[in-house]
Image (cartoon, rainbow, N blue to C red):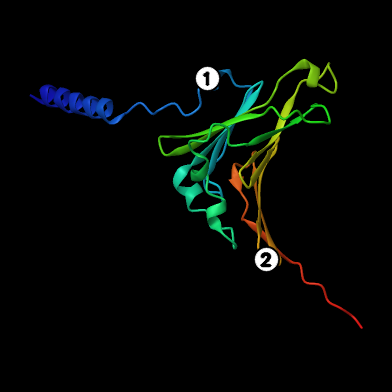
Amino acid sequence: MMKRMMALVLACVSLVSITGCKKSKVLVENEKDAKEVIECSSDNMYGLEKIVVFEDRAVAVFDQKICESFKYDENNSEEFSLKGYLGKKNPGFRAYVENMVDVYPNEDKSSIEVKNGHYVVTVIFPNKESYKEDPNEDFVIWALRIGDMDIEFDEKSIELEYVARGYDVMWYYKQNFDRSKGKWDHVYEERVGCETSVTL
């Protein structure tokens, strides 16, 4: 009797674990083929969770809810929203690439979509040998410009930047992620006024 009871309990647990595990939707296609996958917690001012770097593109993944509740623009937070870029054929996002010729060819292609409660932003740059400053070196994507936000990254950190502009003042917001510690710093804020004082 005890064996039958134990078998029934194990069967129930197995059934619950099988039905409770839903296959999550793939957010970044072909992620396994990426040169680098940079992951971070989403508790930052943009809700950034991941940057996936390929040979010719980078994909940034944001928690949609956090991204939409952006609260660091003293002037007008609606300007930041990524929602306004949805449906645009080419939203104009940009990748910054080392070893690219000085006159950057205006050939970036970008897209944005919503997947499973996340904004997934893709920026493709022209990976052409003729655009290399040094033909013996690879291209290296080191930053993304997405709307009004800048995201810089390297092997040690991720840096988020945003500038809000008012009539006669600007607010600078910056936040850093230490990749070795897996932790975000607090949001650094600086207010710069444009007033000038006249001395007689």
| 1 or 2: tag closer to the N-terminus | 1
- Quarter holding the N terminus is top left
Which residue is situated farthest in the right direction here? 200
Count of marks placed on residues: 2
Q: Amino acid at mark 2?
A: Tyr
Residue 30, position in %: x, y?
A: 52, 19
Please state which of residues 121 and 84 is positioned toward the viewer in this rendering.
Answer: 84
Q: Tags 1 and 2 in contact by the CB under 8 Å rule?
A: no
Q: Mark yes or no: residue 119 visible.
A: yes
Is residue 35 rendered to the left or right of residue 131? left
Please state which of residues 42 and 93 is positioned toward the viewer in this rendering.
Answer: 93
Secondary element type, mark 1: loop
Residue 100, position in %: x, y?
A: 79, 27
Residue 61, position in %: x, y?
A: 53, 36
Residue 20, position in %: x, y?
A: 28, 31
Q: Mark yes or no: residue 190 visible.
A: no
Which residue is situated farthest in the bottom direction here? 200
Position of residue 168 relative to residue 162, above or below, is below
Q: Residue at x 66, y 22 (%)?
A: 56
Q: Residue at x 48, y 42 (%)?
A: 63
Q: Residue at x 56, y 52 (%)?
A: 79
Q: Residues within 10 Å of mark 2 (few under 14, many from 20)?
A: few
Position of residue 168 relative to residue 139, above or below, is below
Q: Amino acid at mark 1?
A: Asn
Is residue 13 rendered to the left or right of residue 33? left
- Quarter holding the C terminus is bottom right
Residue 8's image quarter? top left
Mark 1 lies on residue: 30
Q: Which mark is residue 167?
A: 2
Q: Residue at x 17, y 28 (%)?
A: 9
Secondary element type, mark 2: loop
